[in-house]
Amino acid sequence: MSGAPFLALEGPDGAGKTTLAACVADSLAHLGVQHVDRRQVSTHSTYAATLMAPLARMLWHSGDSPDLSDSFWAHLQASWFTAHGEQVVAPALAAGPILVDGWYFKLASHLTGQGWSTAQIDYLFSRVRRPDHTILLDVEPEVLWDRKADQLRPAELGMHGSYTTLGRESFLDYQKRGLDRLRNMAAAGGWHVMKVPADEDLNTTAHRVTALIRRLVLTTTPSASGERL
């Protein structure tokens, strides 16, 4: 399938992006939809995979510490998503539609709250491939706290914010600010916003997301297979 759409689930920490992306891909396998992990190194190039592997370890397997600034991590993320778009997303699209479990937008939403201007963020990620469609999972932070309070990392609690202590209050404030910015990005970018009620079970949410993505896959003519916008 040529010219297949590139779709991304986005949302705050704990919104269920990875679980839902896997469920959707399983349900829509007959349409060729693939779940592509945002942390996947290249399977297309041994050279790229060799360079991406230490990036992945630094970003997701090195623990959390305030010893390095958000500027360091932001530039690392920009490098990662540039490589991922070129070496993972682009080759996968040759086989059909792909759905990634998060893109760089959540990071961008937090950077705005850490003193970065929109112009600085746009420039930092200007060379990163953009999805044809982004679906925002709009889940209130209180729900997220109830889901995974005992699994949260310091970075998710607001380590790079201006909080004196990290815990429930810092998490709710940090994630609420980030979610508000994601909502603004969704409005400006024409994203699809899916409100997830507190009492909605995973199967129901997965069914709704699957129905939306099925419609998008069947009706979308991609912009040159993911132009940089």
Image (cartoon, helix red, strand yellow):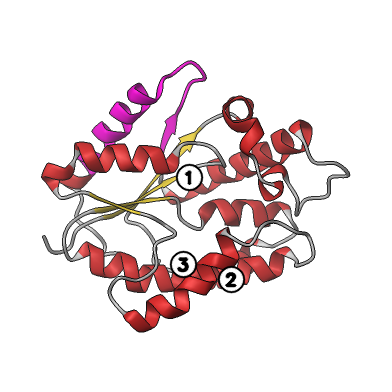
Residue position marked by numbered label 1 in the rendering? 186
Farthest bottom residue? 47
Question: Of the residues under marks 1 and 2, which one precedes in the sequence?
Answer: 2
At 46% across and 74% down in the image, what residue appears?
Answer: 52
At 27% across and 74% down in the image, what residue appears?
Answer: 44
Image quarter in which the C terminus is found = bottom left
Which of the numbered marks, if any, corresponds to residue 200? none
Mark 3 to mark 2: distance in Å? 9 Å
Question: Of the residues under marks 3 and 2, which one precedes in the sequence?
Answer: 2
Mark 1 to mark 2: distance in Å? 24 Å
Element at badge 3?
Answer: helix
Q: Around disc 1, counting alpha carbons within 10 Å, would you say few (fewer than 14), some (14 to 19), or many (20 or more)?
A: some
At 83% across and 49% down in the image, what residue appears?
Answer: 162
Image quarter in which the N terminus is found = bottom left
Residue position marked by numbered label 3 in the rendering? 81
Q: Say if 209 sits above or below 1 in the image.
A: above
Q: What secondary structure do most residues of the magenta stretch adopt?
A: helix
Element at badge 1?
Answer: helix
Q: Is residue 71 left or right of residue 23?
A: right
Q: Say if 72 sits above or below 193 in the image.
A: below
Which of the numbered marks, if any, corresponds to residue 76? 2
Q: Say if 184 sits above or below 80 in the image.
A: above
Residue 97: horizontal and vertical position, in percent?
21, 54
Q: Say if 188 sits above or below 42 in the image.
A: above
Q: Is residue 125 visible?
A: no
Q: Does the segment drawn in magenta span residue 39?
A: no
Tell me the magenta residue range. 192-216
Q: Residue flagged by tag 1: what amino acid is it?
A: Ala
Q: Around disc 3, counting alpha carbons within 10 Å, would you say few (fewer than 14), some (14 to 19), or many (20 or more)?
A: many
